[in-house]
Image (cartoon, rainbow, N blue to C red):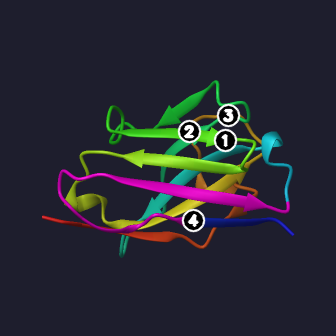
Amino acid sequence: QAQLVESGGGLVQAGGSLRLSCAASGLTFSMYAMGWFRQAPGKEREFVSAISWGGGSTSYADSVKGRFTISRDNAKSTVYLQMNGLKSEETAVYYCAASRGAVGQWRAPGMAYWGKGTRVTVSS
C-alpha cells in the first residue's frame, strides 16, 4: 500500500526558510511525478509545485516562483520542497502528492496518492 509521509514543517518567522521532505513507500517512486499542495484554514487546497519522475521538469505556482525549489532523490524515494522568503499568508498544511500524469499546474482531484500533511506556520 502506497504511503507518503511529510516532515519538516514548523514555526518560522516571515522571511525565513523551511525545507519539507516527503518519503514515499509502497510505490515505484521513479514512475511518479511528485508534487506539493497546501491548504490554509477555510481555503481550498492549492497547487504549489511539481517535479517529473526524472527530475528534469518542474512547475510552480506563480505565487512561489523564485522562492521555492522542488527536488527529488529517487534513490531515497523522497521529494523535497525548499521554501525561502516565507510569507505569513503561506501558513498552511502542506501536502505531498503523487501523480502518474505529466508535470503542470495540477489540480487536487487528479492525484493518485496523498500524504497526511505537515503544518507550516509563518509568523509576521
Q: Amino acid at mark 2?
A: Ser
Q: Do the CB atoms of the residues marked 1 and 3 lie less than 8 Å apart? A: no
Q: Do the CB atoms of the residues marked 4 and 1 lie less than 8 Å apart? A: no
> Most prominent secondary structure in the magenta stretch?
strand
Q: What is the span of residues highlighted in magenta in the rendered image? A: 7-26
Residue 93 x, y percent position in the rendering: 44, 69
Q: Is residue 47 above or below residue 68?
A: below
Q: CA distance from mark 2 to mark 1?
A: 7 Å
Q: Amino acid at mark 3?
A: Ser
Q: CA distance from mark 1 to mark 3?
A: 12 Å
Q: Amino acid at mark 1?
A: Asp
Q: Amino acid at mark 4?
A: Glu
Quadrant position of the N terminus in the picture:
bottom right
Residue 17 x, y percent position in the rendering: 30, 51
Residue 90 x, y percent position in the rendering: 30, 59
Which residue position holds label 4?
6
Say the numbered circle drawn on residue 73: 1
Which residue position holds label 3?
52
Residue 38 x, y percent position in the rendering: 45, 60
Residue positioned 73% across, 50% down in the render: 77
Q: Residues within 10 Å of mark 2 (few under 14, many from 20)?
A: many
Q: Earlier in the sequence, mark 4 or mark 1?
A: 4
Which residue position holds label 2?
71
Q: Do the CB atoms of the residues marked 2 and 1 lie less than 8 Å apart? A: yes
